[in-house]
Image: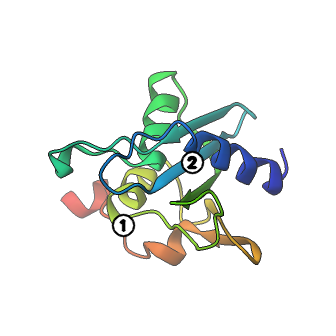
Amino acid sequence: MTDKELIEAAKEASSQSYSPYSKFKVGAALLCDDGELFTGCNVENASYSATCCAERTALFSAVAAGKRSFKKIAVAGSSDGAFAIITQPCGVCLQALSEFCSGEFEVLLTDKSGIRKMKLSDFLPYPFSKTSMN
């Protein structure tokens, strides 16, 4: 799957967003090492802390299906369908991804100028891990 196809899958996933409060629809497309794709959207809640971001929705769906090894994730968000600005993963999503992915894991973002390719370590250089608990 190309980076462009992964971004398009994230944009498509955003159409399923439940975002009555922010009106900001986010989609994520997570590519497993075996080539299987899992998508997710943000699901808001009146109790804001119960909201789940698109990235974690995709990740948790993949993990629930038995996946543990991932290649890259694409994230796209918009309030008007234009996807004109970068929508990057929040800290909670980055930490959740770091449970299963190395710092080299690719994070694809998009805006009006195209696709930006980052690494998980660009956003979260010092993740909390098993070794942090010793």
In the rendered view, would you say 41 is above or below 109? Answer: above
- Give amino acid for label 1: Pro
Give left or right: position of 17 versus 67: left
Q: Nearer the viewer, mark 1 or mark 2?
A: 2
Q: 9 or 118, which is in the foreground? A: 9
> Crowding at label 1, few (<14), some or many (≥20) Cα neighbours within 10 Å?
some
| Residue marked by disc 2 | 28
- The secondary element bearing badge 2 is classed as strand
| Disc 1 from disc 2: Cα separation | 21 Å
x and y percent of residue 106 in the render? Answer: 65, 61
x and y percent of residue 104 in the render? Answer: 61, 65
Give left or right: position of 132 versus 93: left
Sequence-first disc among 1 and 2:
2
x and y percent of residue 121 in the render? Answer: 51, 72
Q: 80 or 7, which is in the foreground? A: 80
Tell me what residue is drawn at x 49 percent, y 42 percent. 41
Query: Where is residue 33, by image quadrant?
Result: top right
In the rendered view, would you say 75 is above or below 29? Answer: below
- The secondary element bearing badge 1 is classed as loop
x and y percent of residue 83 in the render? Answer: 64, 64
Tell me what residue is drawn at x 47 percent, y 41 percent. 17
Tell me what residue is drawn at x 36 percent, y 58 percent. 95
| Residue marked by disc 1 | 127
Residue 79 - label: none
User: On the rendered image, what quadrant is the C terminus found in?
Assistant: bottom left
- Give amino acid for label 2: Ala
In the rendered view, would you say 60 is above or below 130? Answer: above
Give left or right: position of 116 versus 52: right
- Residue furthest to the left in view is 47
